[in-house]
Amino acid sequence: MSLALSILDQSTVAVGRTPPEAVRETLALAKLADEWGYRRYWLAEHHNSASHAGTAPEILIAAIAATTRRIRVGSAGVMLPHYSALKVAEQFRMLEAIAPGRIDLGVGRAPGSDGRTAFALNPDAAAAADRFPQQVQDLMGWLGDGLPEGHPFRAVSAQPEGPTRPEVWVLGSSDFGAQLAAYFGLPYCFAHFITDGRGSAEAMALYREGFRPHPGVPGRLAAAHGAVAVFALTAATEAEAWRLYKSRELWRLSRDRGVFPPLPSVEEAEAYPYSPEERARLDRMKARAVVGAPEQVVAKLEALAAAHGAAEVAVLTPCHDPAARQASYRLLMEAATALPVRGDADLAA
């Protein structure tokens, strides 16, 4: 395969279907992704949202890990400031015991919600985000590094301890996460789908330039390893892909106003009375969108990965029709596996 492809799933809620149905669609897609050859299946964390049902990635990871054979399963990510680093370490050590060698622990600093909900999750939310670097260090300590001398909880262990440990990633959409991942020698994924690529190349360059190698250290990397999380959508024909994309267009207009509704149907999007200003915004979005026939989408992803020096791409494909969503991921993998293998030298070019 020329491109290391993974799936990022937000358990998107669609108009006309319930949040529990969105969760069951996630479980069904994960089994297919395992069969199709995707490298990773990542679950997002959102709270108090009508758009996304994925509030507890650790629970979905357990369900998926128990019903798949090969694919790595993980979080993209756990919003660490909401929680105790010890509890997260325990959860993911338990997941590692369920599926040894297949668990990813992606962590992020953003709330994944509104400010009120952040305080409902953690009454100390105002200061919690500032402690994110210390939380990452504590998390790595409880996952196997050990806590330093003088740490107040050095004698506390995170069970179940075992011979393997989750693979820790830092996720972000700004320079902060990139620099933190580089400092700790961890893999880094930029949320390209959130920013539409704004700042993505700069963040990835900061990550590579500032990376501190940790050769031979368990849980750390000897060289930088980056990924980008990208919205992409394909179908049997280019025209059909752009038709399906209309749902995403209308949803994005709401998101950019701070409203997070269920994903509208294509028919609802086609009937929506867009203003001239909204049409102009959609045209700008469409020019950057990774949408088209399978070969076109793979080519766009290849170019995007190369431009960012990324070794992997995690694909996000919210689609109102669950069958069309499954088809998009299947067609994408079929097109990707038909291309020649790309080497590290190509990535660095």
Image (spheres, helix red, strand yellow):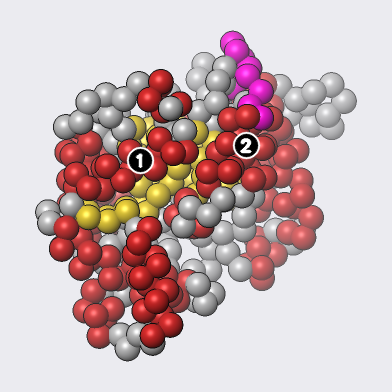
Q: Is the C terminus in the top left, top right, bottom left or bottom right quadrant? A: top left
Relative to 291, does residue 100 appear above or below in the rendering? above
Residue 84: % across, % down: 68, 45
Residue at mark 1? 303
Residue 46 place in picture, x, y as percent:
51, 59
Residue type marked 2:
Leu
The one nearer the camera, 99 or 244, is 244
- Specify few, some or many for label 1: CA neighbours under 10 Å numbering under 14, 14-19, or 20 or more: few
Q: Along the polypeptide, which appears first: circle 1 or circle 2?
A: 2
Left/right placement of residue 67 relative to residue 281 reads: left
The secondary structure type at the circle numbered 2 is helix
Residue bearing mark 2: 206
Q: CA distance from mark 1 to mark 2?
A: 20 Å
Which residue is depicted at the point 24% across and 80% down?
270
Q: Amino acid at mark 1?
A: Ala
| Left or right of 236 on screen, residue 122 | right
Q: Most prominent secondary structure in the magenta stretch?
A: loop
Residue 48 sits above or below residue 268 on the image: above
Using the image, determine if residue 189 lies above or below residue 182: below
**Residue 73's x, y, as percent?**
40, 37
Whether residue 104 is visible: no
In the image, the segment drawn in magenta is 210-220
- Residue 206 percent location from the top left of the image: 62, 37
The residue positioned farthest toward the left in the image shown: 236
Residue 229 in view here: yes
| Residue at position x 59%, y 22% in the image | 220
Q: Secondary structure at mark 1?
A: helix
Asked whether 218 falls inside the magenta stretch, the response is yes
Quadrant showing the N terminus? top left
Residue appearing at x 32%, y 88% in the figure: 273
When asked about the image quadrant of residue 211, the answer is top right
